[in-house]
């Protein structure tokens, strides 16, 4: 199983300071008004870790709500997002919501697997972005909002 095509320090360097600042501002404005710059930087890093691993593994993965907010903001910057995916060497990483699988228990299991896969790839998990078992809602509004290996690169 391929875990990731790039090392964590390489992946983090794929987004410049201007794009990072724009993503933080976007998430703050649209989702999370009390987001600090420090927490925003950490959120960008967690999104990068998720995407770097999700794009390179055949495992089904799901972002936490907070990571998903940064991913949504990034996808709206289509040219930058596509270039980022290309620079990861993964091909375009599609966001594939699954509105029919809302199951909090399964969602928590999926998040735990996602955290484990990201950590196994050498990325650090920030607990403020990945809820622990049973402590908060497992994912966004749908437990099945995932990256799908079937649609990568298409």
Image (spheres, helix red, strand yellow):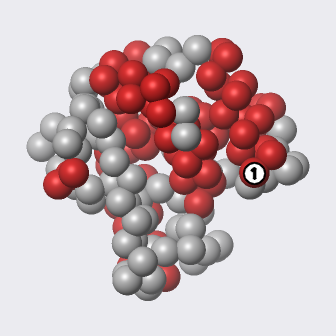
Report x, y in % for residue 84. 41, 24
135 or 104, which is in the foreground? Answer: 104
Looking at the image, residue 129 lies above or below residue 77 = below
At horizontal 46% and vertical 26% (from top left) the residue drawn is 79
Residue drawn at x 39%, y 53% as measured from the top left: 95
Q: Badge 1: few (under 14), some or many (20 or more) residues near its Cα, within 10 Å? A: few
Could you tell me if residue 63 is visible in this image? yes
* Residue visible at 21% across and 38% down in the picture: 153
| Residue identifier under label 1 | 30
From the viewer's perspective, is 122 left or right of 44? left
Q: Quadrant of the N terminus?
A: top left
| x and y, in percent, of residue 130 in the image | 56, 56
* Quadrant location, the C terminus: top left
Closest to the observer, 126 or 12: 12
Residue 139 in the image: state x and y as whole percent. Answer: 53, 68
Q: Is residue 48 left or right of residue 86?
A: right
Quadrant in the rendering for residue 56? top left
């Amino acid at each position: 199983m391929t875990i990731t095509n790039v090392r964590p320090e390489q992946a983090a360097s794929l987004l410049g300071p201007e794009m990072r600042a724009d993503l933080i501002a976007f998430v703050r404005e649209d989702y999370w008004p009390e987001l600090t710059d420090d927490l925003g930087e950490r959120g960008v890093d967690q999104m990068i870790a998720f995407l770097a691993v999700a794009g390179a593994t055949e495992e089904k993965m799901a972002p936490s709500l907070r990571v998903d907010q940064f991913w949504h903001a990034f996808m709206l910057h289509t040219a930058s997002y596509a270039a980022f995916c290309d620079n990861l060497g993964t091909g375009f990483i599609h966001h594939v919501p699954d509105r029919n699988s809302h199951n909090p228990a399964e969602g928590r299991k999926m998040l735990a697997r996602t955290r484990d896969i990201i950590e196994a790839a050498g990325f650090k998990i920030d607990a403020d972005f990945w809820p622990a078992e049973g402590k908060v809602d497992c994912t966004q509004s749908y437990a099945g909002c995932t990256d799908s290996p079937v649609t990568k690169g298409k």
